[in-house]
């Protein structure tokens, strides 16, 4: 056990020393911690988020829709290290206080969860979702697959225990590494003799998996380069201009945009 | 547990006569589906075939199961009204697919429908913290790692709080009508209540009053109670399910046994 003398008590107690709250994160409770409205622009879709692996899924899709149909959207930066996700305005758009989240001002709908947002946008703009019922069912299955897989290579698993936890526990790192590699193998096999996850055309299934997979196959620890179908597919998608722009929206670094209101903002 | 995927042995799957062929087990993710199908049976007389896939015997690595779900997880299903049969994997995808096929348990109102998918997806992304995280490190791991238990306990309670606050002003997850969002979330809270021994006390589950009320409301439904018994682990479970009558056979036998 770790610590050696540890044994599970009957009732769990929150301990601020070991689980430092960071502006509202790392608490066993939810809800607003401050009164503040969200900014709103004039376009139909209002995106609140960051260019993290989950957040960029949505900005990538919106940039693709911009390429395809000329539709613009507003995007606003939510600083999750500074508690922006716990303002009353943000909690109203996502009671779970996670990014990304959007409003559709044409019908007042709030959409949270990256998977729900991509499905919603695909139906709203009639794009990136197969029409054929069999291909469509496949696409949706691969979308849900990523939602359930994400926590194992993300915050609930590998990404946390290898690199962010205060110590390296072999048991935890092994557990999540085995699962991450297994997931990569599933995806790699799925792309055998296929251009994209659902066939010849790119779909929301690809947008769901791309960001995370890109990061994973770069890791020598995971023998990432051995997943040759994934390497090809990651590069192919990464070369798309809309995907390149999408990663800059609400992005970190010098060419990140803190807000996005039109294509001209990139210039 | 291996870092690779794919079939490990040749095995064909059984098939019945109904449209829906479900290959599954009575775990939280499996009963989401059987609960929905039993509700559809109550509402519209839908019948289905449910076959048990014993994951402890590695049946999820049989060749035909892998064709239906390359991820080798239950639940997985075929819709045989298509030729060749249409496969669906991932519990969330299956819930959505069946609700659309039978036009039930997804709200008609635009905003309620959007909420339904919000919460359905929320459950998909949340369960790995509750199950793969908390459940594993609290109940199953061979070593007790305080940091991991603390991290996942904190997140589990945060999730209960999100649900409890939402259910303060909503009868069901999407408003007044029960939906697939409820069917997705319910079995995992049940898991903490009943199957992870000591967890309900450890996480002080009874303090979430709105959540407890909602759990009881759904738990009373006959279809939910039947759904838990399919391919199940609970008392009076049935290994396979081909018609409503399959439940009666077990119920009758139990009653006769009691009488003796």
Image (cartoon, rainbow, N blue to C red):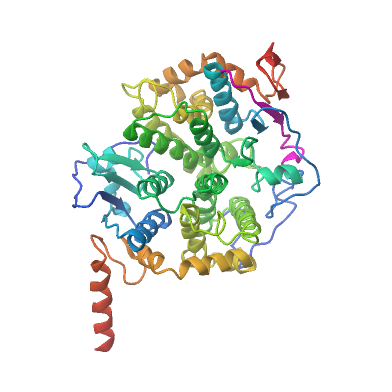
Q: Is residue A78 magenta?
A: yes
Pick whichever, B169 or B110, lies toward us: B110
Task: Give x and y (percent) for residue B61.
Answer: 28, 43
Q: Is residue A25 visible?
A: yes
Pick whichever, A266 or B31, lies toward us: A266
Task: Give x and y (percent) for residue A124.
Answer: 52, 32
Q: Is residue A114 magenta?
A: no
Residue A164, picture quadrant: top right
Location of residue A251 with respect to A263 vertically, above or below? below
Task: Give x and y (percent) for residue B126.
Answer: 54, 48
Q: Dividing the image into 4 quarters, which one contains the N terminus of chain A?
A: bottom right
Residue A267, picture quadrant: top right
Question: Which residues, given as a range, are shown in magenta?
Answer: A70-85
Q: Residue at x 69, y 48 (%)?
A: A26
Q: Is residue B109 left or right of residue B51?
A: right
Q: Is residue A187 left or right of residue A87?
A: left
Q: Residue at x 39, y 23 (%)?
A: A196
- Residue lying farthest to the top in this orientation: A267
Q: Residue at x 29, y 50 (%)?
A: B23
Location of residue A247 with respect to A177 vertically, above or below? above
């Amino acid at each position: 056990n770790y610590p050696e003398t540890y044994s599970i008590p009957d009732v769990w107690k929150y301990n601020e020393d070991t689980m430092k709250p960071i502006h509202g994160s790392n608490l066993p409770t939810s809800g607003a911690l401050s009164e503040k409205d969200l900014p709103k622009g004039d376009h139909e879709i209002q995106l609140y988020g960051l260019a993290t692996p989950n957040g960029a899924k949505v900005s990538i899709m919106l940039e693709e829709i911009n390429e395809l149909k000329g539709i613009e959207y507003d995007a606003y930066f939510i600083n999750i290290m500074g508690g922006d996700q716990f303002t009353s305005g943000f909690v109203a758009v996502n009671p779970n206080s996670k990014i990304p989240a959007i409003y559709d001002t044409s019908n007042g709908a709030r959409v949270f969860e990256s998977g729900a947002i991509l499905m919603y946008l695909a139906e709203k703009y009639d794009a990136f979702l197969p029409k054929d019922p069999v291909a469509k069912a496949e696409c949706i299955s691969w979308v849900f697959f990523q939602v359930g897989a994400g926590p194992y290579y993300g915050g609930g698993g590998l990404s946390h225990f290898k690199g962010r936890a205060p110590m390296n526990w072999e048991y935890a790192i092994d557990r999540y590494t085995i699962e991450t590699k297994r997931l990569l193998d599933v995806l790699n096999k799925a792309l055998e003799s296929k251009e994209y996850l659902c066939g010849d055309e790119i779909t929301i299934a690809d947008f769901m998996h791309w960001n995370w997979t890109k990061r994973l196959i770069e890791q020598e620890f995971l023998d990432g380069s051995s997943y040759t179908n994934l390497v090809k597919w990651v590069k192919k998608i990464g070369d798309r201009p809309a995907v390149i722009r999408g990663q800059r929206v609400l992005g970190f670094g010098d060419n990140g945009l803190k807000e996005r209101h039109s294509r001209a903002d990139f210039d | 547990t291996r870092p690779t995927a794919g079939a490990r042995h040749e095995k064909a799957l059984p098939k019945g006569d109904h449209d829906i062929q479900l290959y599954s087990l009575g775990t939280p993710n499996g009963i989401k589906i059987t609960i929905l199908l039993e509700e559809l049976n109550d509402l519209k007389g839908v019948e289905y075939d449910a076959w048990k896939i014993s994951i402890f015997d590695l049946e999820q690595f049989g060749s035909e199961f892998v064709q239906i779900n390359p991820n080798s997880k239950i639940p997985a299903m075929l819709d045989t009204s298509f030729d060749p049969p249409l496969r669906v994997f991932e519990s969330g995808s299956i819930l959505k697919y069946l609700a659309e096929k039978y036009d039930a348990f997804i709200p008609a109102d635009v905003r309620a429908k959007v909420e339904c998918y919000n919460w359905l997806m929320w459950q998909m992304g949340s369960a790995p913290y509750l199950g793969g995280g908390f459940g594993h490190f609290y109940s199953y791991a061979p070593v007790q790692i305080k940091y991991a238990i603390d991290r996942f306990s904190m997140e589990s309670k945060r999730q209960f709080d999100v649900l409890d606050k939402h259910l303060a002003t909503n009868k069901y997850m999407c408003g007044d009508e029960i939906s697939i969002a409820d069917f997705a979330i319910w079995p995992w809270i049940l898991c903490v209540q009943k199957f992870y021994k000591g967890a309900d006390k450890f996480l002080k589950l009874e303090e979430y009053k709105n959540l407890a009320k909602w759990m009881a409301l759904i738990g009373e439904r006959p279809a939910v109670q039947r759904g838990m018994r399919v391919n199940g682990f609970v008392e009076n479970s049935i290994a396979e399910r081909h018609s409503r009558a399959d439940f009666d056979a077990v119920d009758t036998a139990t009653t006769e046994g009691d009488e003796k």
